[in-house]
Amino acid sequence: MTRMDLAQVIINEASDAQIIVLKERDGHRSFPILIGSAEAGAIDRGLRDQRTPRPMTHDLVNNVLNALGVELERVVVNDMRNKTFYARLILVRDGEAIEVDSRPSDAIAVATLRDAPIYAEERVLQAVCKSDDFD
């Protein structure tokens, strides 16, 4: 697994498809993921530490994890099939790891709320990455 950073959130209000770019923390590989507007907004709000008056769906997930005493250890983009990315939330409760299937956009939105690390499996990186310098 490789540690990734959320390098960019590209919001285009004229389109339903938004883009996030994950970049290798200690390297130059990166890849985009197309996401929905609601998820892009949630990620952007999480990064800016902006809260809505009432909890949105990702806030709700965060609140449920808090209420149950569950830690989000990490998010892993673990697969890509038919041009669709898959992710897992790696949760920990009472020392026990629990893996939950998720869309990457939802997983990353919750990760931004909880300041949790994001990883990608090497097979995903090899399948989709390009070398870019975001500096």
Image (spheres, helix red, strand yellow):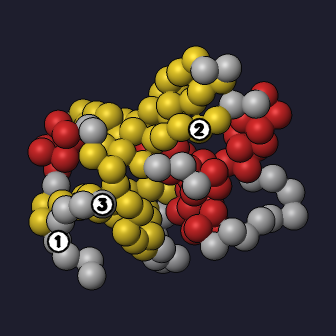
- At mark 1, the secondary structure is loop
Find numbered disc 2 in the image and state the secondary structure of the residue it sits on: strand
Tag 2 and tag 3, C-beta contact below 8 Å: no
Q: If you read the primary sequence from the N terminus, does the residue marked by circle 3 or circle 1 appear first?
A: 3
Distance between mark 3 and mark 1 Cα atoms: 12 Å
In the figure, 3 relative to 95: above or below? below
**Disc number lying in front (1 or 2):** 2
Of the residues shown, which amino acid type is indicated by label 2?
Leu
Image coordinates of residue 39 in percent, x first then y, are 56, 56
* Circle number at residue 132: 1
The residue depicted at 70 percent of the width and 40 percent of the height is: 61
Q: Is residue 92 left or right of residue 134?
A: right
What amino acid does circle 3 point to?
Arg
Q: Which mark is residue 25?
A: 3
**Callout 1, which amino acid?**
Asp
What is the spatial separation of the Cα atoms under label 1 and label 2, in whole angstroms? 29 Å
Between discs 1 and 2, the one toward the N terminus: 2
Q: Which residue is mark 2?
A: 72
Residue 79 higher or lower than 36, as above or below: above
Instruction: Answer above or below: position of 68 versus 41.
Output: above
